[in-house]
Image (cartoon, coloured by chain):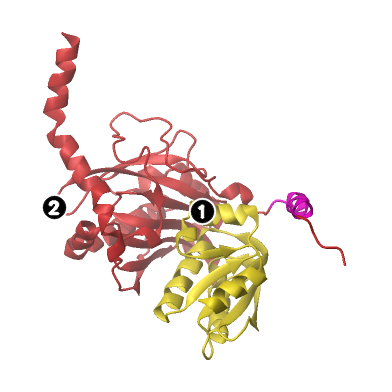
Amino acid sequence: MPEAQVKMNVRDAGEKASIIDVQGELTAFAESVLMDAYNQASDGHVRAIILNFEELEYMNSSGIGLLVTLLIRINREKQQLLTYGLSEHYRSIFQITRLDDAIAIHDSEEEAVRAANSA
Amino acid sequence: MTEQTPRDETREEEQKPEPRDAAYWASYAETLKVAGVAEGATNINVEGRRAVGPLQGFGKMWQKTYRVRLGEAGVTPAEVIKTWKENYKDFWPEGNIFYAPLAGITPGEVALISGSLPGGVKLSTGVMVLYADDESFSLMTPEGHPFSGWITFSSFEEEGTTVAQVQVLMRANDPLYELGLRMGGHKMENEMWRKTLENLAAHFDVHEPVEMKLVCVDPKLQWSHYRNIWQNAGIRSALYSITAPLRWRRNRARQV
């Protein structure tokens, strides 16, 4: 299987949230990287996972599918999924695929972290 | 330190190069529009409907993956997808008709479908082309379709072999469809994609078995979406068929 063209970095974002910085391409090949990042981010008492898409370079429909399966996993753990850093193009994709019905989109890291820690 | 003004941020957004995937995605539209209705097709359950993904459905969420290895064919993934797009309707098994859009399988295009549900109920529905690039394309379903979700057709190299794959991420759209899936619908669907991949492989003179992997991603029903039944395309198609004589008589009366 081709190598994933993505890197993900996990950071703390307050008592209740973690941030996953997505750098590169979100396609089917990113699955194990995303799930490993989630496992790392979800350690402890985290109630919210924030995806930072500022350095997202490419996403296909399989990448969107990954976000859905991640969301299901997050909801199962009674956690919340938020995002920030989406360009207009990727916001439009969230709208077309109706992911914005279930995943909160914020304009900045500050806003996302505030929303995550106040939930 | 200089703070960015909203105008600076807009200018910065405009100056960013367009992402590589920009041309591969459908543009946002509030509802679906059908460009032309081919002879034999019925557009009663697509025009004006919204496209729905797996989050908008009612039933359990499934990820179903069907794949076939095309090793002996000596074709590249791009050749497989090109062939698949050009001959999509021909690879479908008998009993289901895909009315390809005039522009072909390109992002944003809407296709009509005539099919059948368990029990022989006739179904008129359709799909929107959500995404299409050289090595994959995805279809998204409308409100009222048997399931809410995406179907992704792709081809890739794996261990030196070209593989063709269909992957469905879906929930039954409403409680009636969920019941239908449990009473034979899943089996019908599995058979449909198995047969489609066999037909695709046979086109390249390959006769390999289709592998299936069925995963229940979320066993919970989304009861908040039970009202999706109001758009059930199976019920509406059946009512449309039943009322055909009335429409015929009305049209005749207008001609006289």
Placement of the N terminus of chain A among the 4 image quadrants: bottom right
Q: Residue at x 42, y 82 (%)?
A: A77
**Relative image position of residue A47 (x, y in whole percent):** 50, 82
Which residue position holds label 2?
A: B119
Judged from this view, the residue extending furthest toward the bottom is: A44
Magenta span contains residue A32: no
For the residue labelled by badge 1, is the local secondary structure a helix, a strand or a loop? helix
Quadrant hosting residue A37? bottom right
Chain appearing in yellow on the rendered image: A
Q: Range of the magenta residues? A: B6-18
Which residue matches tag 1? A95
In this view, the residue in front, A27 or B82, is A27
Q: Secondary structure at mark 2?
A: loop
Residue B202: x and y, percent? 38, 53
Tell me, by letter, which chain the rendering colours red: B
Q: In the shown orientation, is residue B99 left or right of residue B153?
A: left
Mark 2 touches mark 1? (CB < 8 Å): no
Q: The disc numbered 2 marks a residue on which chain?
A: B
Task: Estimate how packed mark 2 is, as few (under 14), some (14 to 19) or many (20 or more) residues with alpha carbons within 10 Å.
Answer: few
Q: Is residue B58 visible?
A: no
- Please say if B103 is above or below A95: above
Kindly identify the amino acid type of the residue bearing the numbered disc 1.
Answer: Gln
Direction from residue B116 to residue B1 in the image, left or right: right
In the image, residue B194 lies at what x, y percent? 32, 60
Where is residue A73 shown, x and y percent of the image?
Answer: 44, 77
